[in-house]
Image (cartoon, grey):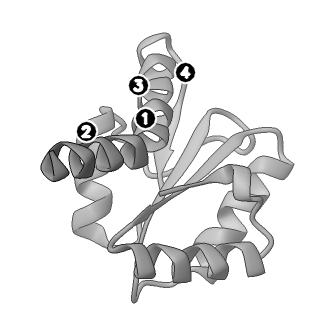
Amino acid sequence: MPAVGGLARRAKAVRPVAEELRRAQRSASEGGLIGVLPGDIPTADALRELLGAPSTDLPRGEGLLVHPAVEGADTAGPARALLAHEEAGGRSLALLIGAREQRERLERAFVEAGLRVASIAH
């Protein structure tokens, strides 16, 4: 049964990200706008394809702006862009990708840059 417990823990950990991505997909299918900030290009391209979001930018304050964050890439620039989008009335999401320790470091960096925890998903 340890394998089942491990699977259940992983599913529980992925659920918030999956729910946010489903909301983003619903928004896009209903005519909502989704933009994916570049950063780590292969990761951003994969997310753009998954979401069906060809745009890398959005009109200021409109739609959902997502940044797939990986360790080693810049966090300050994307954090500023996400904050500016929220301040203009849009929704933002920093999607943290990597091992738990990497995601924790990324979360600290985004929070220190002023992004709200509610705008961060692991």
Q: Earlier in the sequence, mark 2 or mark 1?
A: 1
Residue 55 appears anywhere in the view: no
Give the farthest residue toward the bottom.
72
**Snapshot quadrant of residue 111:** bottom right
> Which mark is in front, 4 or 2?
2
> Which mark is in front, 3 or 1?
1
Separation of marks 4 and 3 at Cα, in angstroms? 9 Å
Q: Are marks 3 and 1 in contact (CB under 8 Å)?
A: yes
Q: Are marks 1 and 4 in contact (CB under 8 Å)?
A: no
Q: Are marks 2 and 1 in contact (CB under 8 Å)?
A: yes
Q: Earlier in the sequence, mark 1 or mark 4?
A: 1
Reading the image, the residue beneath label 1 is 21
Q: Earlier in the sequence, mark 4 or mark 3?
A: 3
Separation of marks 3 and 1 at Cα, in angstroms? 6 Å
At horizontal 39% and vertical 89% (from top left) the residue drawn is 72
Q: Secondary structure at mark 1?
A: helix
Kindly identify the amino acid type of the residue bearing the numbered disc 1.
Leu
> Which mark is in front, 2 or 1?
1
The disc at residue 50 is: 2
Q: Secondary structure at mark 3?
A: helix
Image position of 58 (left or right of 52): right
Q: Earlier in the sequence, mark 4 or mark 2?
A: 4
Reading the image, the residue beneath label 3 is 25
Q: Earlier in the sequence, mark 3 or mark 2?
A: 3
The disc at residue 32 is: 4
Give the farthest residue toward the front.
1
Crowd tier of the residue under label 4, counting other residues whose Cα lies within 10 Å: few below 14, some 14–19, many 20 or above: few
Residue 75 locus on image (x, y percent): 57, 80
Residue 18 locus on image (x, y percent): 39, 36
